[in-house]
Amino acid sequence: MKKIILSAAILVLILTTAFNSVNAASAQAEERVIVLFKDKVDKDLIANNGGKINRELRNIPAVSISVPSVALQGLSRNPNIELIEKDSIVKVEGQVSDWGIDDVKAPVAWNSGYTGTGVKIAVVDTGISLSHSDLSVAGGASFVAYTNSYNDDNGHGTHVSGIIGARNNDIGTIGVAPDSDLYAVKVLDSSGSGYLSDVIAGIDWAITNQMDIINLSLGSTTDSPTLHQAVDKAYNNGTLVVAAAGNSGLINGNGDTVEYPAKYDSAIAVAAVDSSNIRASFSSTGPKVEVSAPGVSIYSTYLNNGYARMSGTSMATPYTTGILALLKQQNPALTNIELRDKLDQNVVDLGAAGRDTLTGYGLIQAQAQPVESNKTVISVTTDKDSYLKGETVTVEATVKDSNLIALNGATVNLTITSPSGSQTNAVQTTDSSGTVVFNIATNKKTKIGTYNINVQSSLSGYSSSNATTQYTIN
């Protein structure tokens, strides 16, 4: 069956190489799609409609199938099927201590005995070079059709892996977490292409094999409900999911250009900065940007036992994965949510105070020892991303100290800025769980557009902090 390259294809994000997506109409009578069931996969239903299962997932009720085009309309009306989406093509875009190692203060953690020991990391990519002298691969899996080997035949996955965990030896370079356990999850082929369902299968494998962290140095401008469910499932199972924010940012930093899966709440969206800690001109921007990391001219492992320099949010992402591995070793009892909070609060603020749309909370930093509980750390969410007129917008803010202990009695100031620039303000005090909830009513006169939320916390004896998010009225 001829593969169809779609504009919805996920692109691995490397600045040095770019590919144009191509839309092609298929004259084939058969199509390759992903079918997401509401409860469990009905293999008989697929077979009765002339379909062939290409891949079945373990943790979500979805399959990749090849099926006659004429059967799709009937399948889409089946009450047991949640949705059907194209199984798109995924494509690649593009001992010396790299400058980024010092920038994120990795040696501070090393000197305290934290090197990522015992932390399992799934690099969902093109594989990892199994013969590289500077890398040690603990295991893995291949989801491409032509090989069962997870050896890298492209180079991208090897470069990403070296940033995370190149060994501390007498050769080459060193990764942020040199003693972490790297698992090669090969979902892209030698040309850097692969099916969306293979990426989802790679995440599914990481869930089944209880990975601590999943590194996704890839992204797409198009949302995939099945990919979204897979990322959510991983996060809800206790796995940290780290994803590249994207390389589609405008030079002036305007607009919301963060890509998927980084745009999902269950993923940590990572932006890129250069050696002067200035946002890289290509780095995607928007309210979902969570943190930033080195991503320009990064030196790391490559094919043929070699090394190369690359740029992109693909490089910033494994820096963040490495820092999380150090935090995980240092704080083994913390949940993935608590580790994420620690990542967000232990940063160098690079832009506007608090979280901003260019560099998120700021530049990630390794930590030598737990910080003192002398400042508030606030987070904010809405119960949905978009609302219809007449619905109630629920805004929840949580305030903790620097050790992630809930703060009772903290003051939370809420400011909502409408599309026209007018502002609504409210104030509440946190309860024993450190939480406040604001319910914002809308009606038929409410303006359509994007509303920006800013919350600021304060408590006697603690420094204040703020956080932002947004929602849309349709």
Image (cartoon, grey):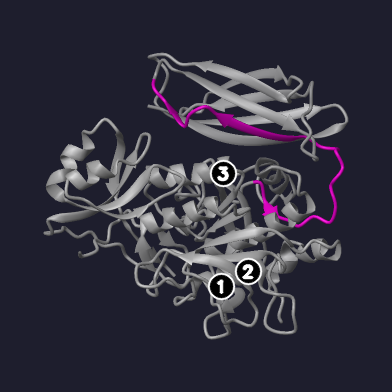
Q: Which residues are magenta?
A: 361-388
Please state the horizontal and vertical placement of residue 62, each as a whole percent of the image.
36, 45
Q: Is residue 47 above or below residue 414?
A: below
Tell me which amino acid carries mark 3: Tyr
Quadrant of the frame with the C terminus: top left
Q: Which structural element holds mark 1?
A: helix
Q: Which residue is mark 2?
A: 163
Instruction: Please tell me whether the stretch drawn in magenta is mainly helix, strand or loop.
Output: loop
- CB of mark 3 within 8 Å of CB of mark 2? no
Quadrant of the frame with the N terminus: bottom left
Please indicate, yes or no, whether residue 225 appears anywhere in the rendered image: yes
Along the line of sight, which residue is nearer the eye, 286 or 226?
226
Left or right: 80, with 303 as reference point: left
| Displayed quadrant of residue 416 | top right
- CB of mark 1 within 8 Å of CB of mark 2? yes
Left or right: 263, with 300 as reference point: left
Q: CA distance from mark 3 to mark 1?
A: 25 Å
Mark 1 neighbour class, 10 Å CA radius: few under 14, some 14 to 19, many 20 or more: many
- Ranked by sequence position, the earlier of labels 3 and 2 is 2
Q: Which residue is mark 3?
A: 235
Q: Is residue 114 above or below residue 82?
A: below
Please state the horizontal and vertical placement of residue 157, each as a whole percent of the image.
52, 69
Tell me which amino acid carries mark 2: Ile
- CB of mark 3 within 8 Å of CB of mark 1? no
